[in-house]
Image: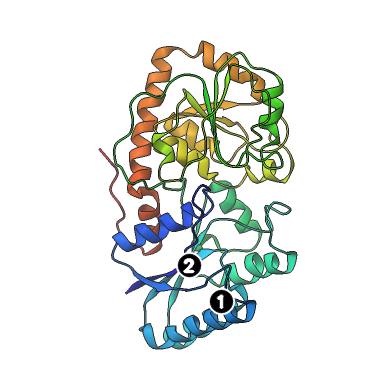
């Protein structure tokens, strides 16, 4: 039997819980069984939460049978408890543990709210305990191998899936550039510098924490904040921008450096909407974009206007067609299904025709 540890968080207009929640939903559709970790983040005391986590792990000794598989999303709440119980379950019950990486706290140092002790425990102590590890891409795989993880444990995801309530994509995507995500100045400093330039092209903005007191000019449209499920069918634009940091010249700082290793979830969002992407050429996922011809790689944001005005219509239509094809896979959970099948040493998910 295959199980997955489930700790759901709701954040109506933020994408934070979207990727792990999609993994839960795909696992459920595959017939895997949930091991729910019931924690009320706001209401429970720290002691109560620790008690619940320990209770869940202890219950696995009676629930699990020899040879069962457990999927664990990394990182998650209860790292110290996981470190304590996973070796025991492997030794006593011969359980196989598979980790799905969402973030590596040490690698994105300074970005997360994790303290350094927990980050070290998460990435240096807990992660090597897993029998198989689903990492983002080849760049992250190389990083993990350099950190001492055995190569035969590692399976690449390539891109995060993006489930939606609808399998259909809206056809009209409009003109200009779309930027979606947390629009806080600390997270998206580049955006405010881009606005200051008063660009000659349309920018459609979506997401929470935008400073609506700014004088936006006639080409900048703030179109509101939507739930992750609603958002793909709300987006309008020729391209979606994947960028991070506070500079328009390059992806800078910790968030910019992290793009060299991770799969930013907004890439999945844009493609799930059938919108090609503009992405920093040094981002790890740029190789996926290039391979599938679903966007254009750029050095800096000053290239955007030329891309929007000079990309031949035929080339744009080809990228839109490819983005829609990849987007349909993302909406169906294709990439996680394929990765988990590789972990289980099965034939795998067949490619779409």
The answer, for residue 307, to whether it is visible in the render is: yes
Percent x, y for residue 337?
35, 55
Q: Residue at x 60, y 31 (%)?
A: 281
Q: Is residue 5 above or below residue 24?
A: below
The answer, for residue 156, to whether it is visible in the render is: no
Percent x, y for residue 240?
51, 30
Q: How would you rate the neighbour count of disc 2 (Cα within 10 Å): few for under 14, some for 14-19, many for 20 or more?
A: some
Q: How far apart are marks 2 and 1 (CA)?
A: 14 Å
Q: How would you rate the neighbour count of disc 1 (Cα within 10 Å): few for under 14, some for 14-19, many for 20 or more?
A: some
Q: Residue at x 39, y 14 (%)?
A: 314
Percent x, y for residue 309?
53, 12
Tag in front: 2 or 1 = 2
Mark number, residue 7: 2
Percent x, y for residue 185?
70, 38
Q: Which residue is drawn at 56% across and 53% down?
A: 141
- Left of 279 or right of it: where is 4? left
Callout 1: SS: helix
Q: Is residue 236 above or below residue 260?
A: above
Give the position of the C terminus as an image quadrant: top left
Q: Which residue is drawn at 29% across and 41% down?
A: 167
Q: Mark 1 points at which residue?
A: 82
Q: Which of 184 and 3 is in front in this view?
A: 184
Q: In which quarter of the image is residue 264?
A: top right
């Amino acid at each position: 039997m295959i199980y997955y540890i489930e700790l759901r968080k709701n954040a109506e207009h933020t994408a934070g819980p979207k990727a792990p929640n999609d993994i839960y939903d795909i696992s459920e559709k595959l017939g895997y069984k949930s091991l729910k970790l019931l924690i009320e983040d706001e209401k429970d005391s720290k002691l109560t939460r620790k008690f619940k986590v320990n209770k869940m792990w202890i219950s696995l000794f009676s629930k699990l049978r020899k040879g069962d598989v457990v999927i664990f999303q990394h990182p998650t709440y209860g790292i110290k408890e996981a470190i304590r119980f996973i070796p025991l379950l492997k030794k006593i019950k011969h359980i196989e543990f598979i980790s799905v990486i969402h973030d590596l706290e040490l690698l994105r140092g300074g970005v997360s709210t994790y303290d350094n002790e927990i980050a070290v425990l998460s990435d240096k102590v807990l992660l090597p305990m897993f029998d198989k590890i689903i990492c983002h891409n080849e760049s992250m795989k190389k990083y993990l191998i350099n950190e001492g993880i055995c190569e035969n444990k590692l399976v690449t995801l390539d891109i995060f899936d993006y489930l939606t309530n609808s399998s259909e994509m809206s056809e009209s995507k409009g003109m200009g550039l779309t930027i979606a995500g947390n629009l806080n100045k600390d997270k998206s400093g580049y955006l405010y510098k881009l606005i200051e330039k008063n660009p000659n092209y349309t920018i459609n903005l979506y997401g929470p924490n935008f400073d609506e007191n700014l004088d936006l000019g006639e080409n900048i449209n703030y179109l509101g904040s939507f739930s992750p499920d609603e958002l793909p069918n709300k987006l309008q634009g020729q391209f979606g921008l994947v960028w991070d940091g506070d500079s328009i010249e390059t992806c800078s700082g910790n968030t910019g450096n992290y793009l060299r290793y991770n799969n930013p979830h907004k890439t999945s969002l844009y493609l799930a909407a059938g919108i090609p992407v503009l992405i920093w050429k040094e981002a790890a996922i740029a190789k996926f974009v290039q391979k599938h011809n679903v966007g254009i790689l750029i050095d800096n944001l000053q290239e955007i206007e030329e891309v929007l005005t000079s990309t031949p219509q035929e080339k744009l239509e080809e990228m839109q067609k490819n983005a829609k094809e990849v987007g349909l896979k993302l909406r169906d959970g294709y990439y996680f299904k394929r990765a988990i099948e590789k972990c289980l040493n099965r034939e795998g998910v067949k490619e779409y025709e």
